[in-house]
Structure formats: C-alpha cells, structure tokens
Image (cartoon, grey):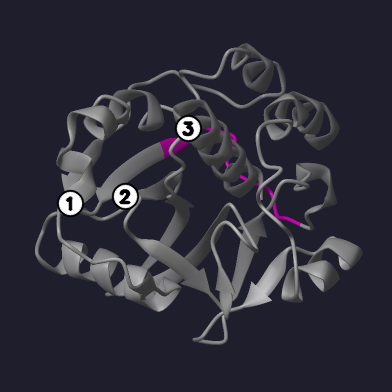
C-alpha cells in the first residue's frame, strides 16, 4: 500500500522547492532517511522535506478508517482576502486531491467528508516560533473550549501565516524542512498534528500540506 501511495505523492513532491536548501543538520537526516528529529521536550518529530518518501518511514498501522483533518489557521495574516480564500481547499486536503480515489483503492475509507476548521487570528509576530510554542497555543485552545476532544482518526493541521517563522529542534522552516508532524499529550489527550509554514505560492502550499498530512496519516 505504501509503495503505491508513494508513487501518488511523488507527483506532488516535484514542485518549486529549488530555493529550499537542505543544509547543516538536515544532511544527516537525508543520509539515513529517518526524518526524525529530537524536539526540545525530548520527543520525536518528523520533518517533511523535498525528498520525503512515505515508503521510507518506519511507521505504524496508520489511519485507514475515516481520517479526519481539523485545521487551525494561526496568525493575524489569515484575515487577508488572499489567504482567507485558500482556507477551504487547505482544510480539505484529501477531498481536493486530484487522485484521492487511489487512497480508497488502498483501503483508506471515507476521505471525502468536509472537515472542520477555524481561524485563530492571534498575532505571534515575526519572531521564530518553536514547536513547543505551537503546542502551547493548541493546548490553550483546548483549555478555552475552542477545540473539542479529538477522535482517534483526527490529525490537526496548523497552518502558519507568512509572518510566523517556524523553528524546530534548532532548524528553520524553508531551510531545513517544509513542514513537520508530531504529537503531544495534554489533559489526558493524545494530540496528533501537522505544522505547515505558509508558502506564498498557493499550489506549493497545498502540495506541501497534502504530503505532510498523508505522511502523518499513514504513519
């Protein structure tokens, strides 16, 4: 199953990423194909790069039955008409995937249901925002009731507005990774999530988010 889905995703991985240099720490990651990095809380996150292939990821059973995407559009930039107009497509990645039927052929069921999403227009400024800071924002949204308890197939997709500079384990978005997925526990819940720094090219933004979400879903 992973081999066929990898071929599907390879179509999306060939896009305008020439400007994203994979340097420094990431050279080792590319050499051993692990993709795993140790986060500030000593947990393991998985980065998505231009060379990510789902078949190389040592994953678990994945989510086959009714995977659910809950998107959070984080940052004040999402109030702009240009970004706001992209939200519906980004919030329904599998439904907008041109060949999503191929996922169903591989036994992944019920991928076309419209998913939930919301904006969180807080101003995080242009400073680097770490993964732990993202976790703090998400935990706060649960605590305030903005997010409800996740079901087992739920993966949260956190879209950062262009002013938010994502960092993870000493690495920076754009230079070392395009997106990443991780999980953490809060209030007795296991939260699985993907972080997608926003690309100004809407097609590239969608392709990056799709690759990250499917990779998280299958692993």
User: What SS does tag 1 mark?
Assistant: helix
Left or right of 48? Residue 71 is left
Looking at the picture, how far across and down is residue 185, in whole percent? Answer: 39, 73
1 or 3: mark nearer the eye: 3
Whether residue 168 is situated above or below residue 138 in the rendered picture? below
Task: Measure the alpha-carbon separation of dots 1 and 2.
Answer: 7 Å
Looking at the picture, how far across and down is residue 2, in whole percent? Answer: 79, 36
Give the residue number, with chain letter if any, for mark 2. 161
The residue carrying pointer 3 sits among few (fewer than 14), some (14 to 19) or many (20 or more) residues within 10 Å by Cα, namely few
Give the residue number, with chain letter if any, for mark 3. 201
Lower position in the chain sequence, tag 3 or tag 2: 2
Q: Residue at x 32, y 27 (%)?
A: 86
Lower position in the chain sequence, tag 1 or tag 2: 1
The magenta-colored residue range is 59-68
The residue carrying pointer 2 sits among few (fewer than 14), some (14 to 19) or many (20 or more) residues within 10 Å by Cα, namely many
- Indicate yes or no whether the magenta region holds residue 83: no
Q: Is residue 161 visible?
A: yes
Marks 2 and 1: in contact by CB < 8 Å?
Answer: yes
Q: Residue at x 45, y 55 (%)?
A: 195
Give the residue number, with chain letter if any, for mark 1. 76
Task: Measure the alpha-carbon separation of dots 3 and 2.
Answer: 13 Å
């Amino acid at each position: 199953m992973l081999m066929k889905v990898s071929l599907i995703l390879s179509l999306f991985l060939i896009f305008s990423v020439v400007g994203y240099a994979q340097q420094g720490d990431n050279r080792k990651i590319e050499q051993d194909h692990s993709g795993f990095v140790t986060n500030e809380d000593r947990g393991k996150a998985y980065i998505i790069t231009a060379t990510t292939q789902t078949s190389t990821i040592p994953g678990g059973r994945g989510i086959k039955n009714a995977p659910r995407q809950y998107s959070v559009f984080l940052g004040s930039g999402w109030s702009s008409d240009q970004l706001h107009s992209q939200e519906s497509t980004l919030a329904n990645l599998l439904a907008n995937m041109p060949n999503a039927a191929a996922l169903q052929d591989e036994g992944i069921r019920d991928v076309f249901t419209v998913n939930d999403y919301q904006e969180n227009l807080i101003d995080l400024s242009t400073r680097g925002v770490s993964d732990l800071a993202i976790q703090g924002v998400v935990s706060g949204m649960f605590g305030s009731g903005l997010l409800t308890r996740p079901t087992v197939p739920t993966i949260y997709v956190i879209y950062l507005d262009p002013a938010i500079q994502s960092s993870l384990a000493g690495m920076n978005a754009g230079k070392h990774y395009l997106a990443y997925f991780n999980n953490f526990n809060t209030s007795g819940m296991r939260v699985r999530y993907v972080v997608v720094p926003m690309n100004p090219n809407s097609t590239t933004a969608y392709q990056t988010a799709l690759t990250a979400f499917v990779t998280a879903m299958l692993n």
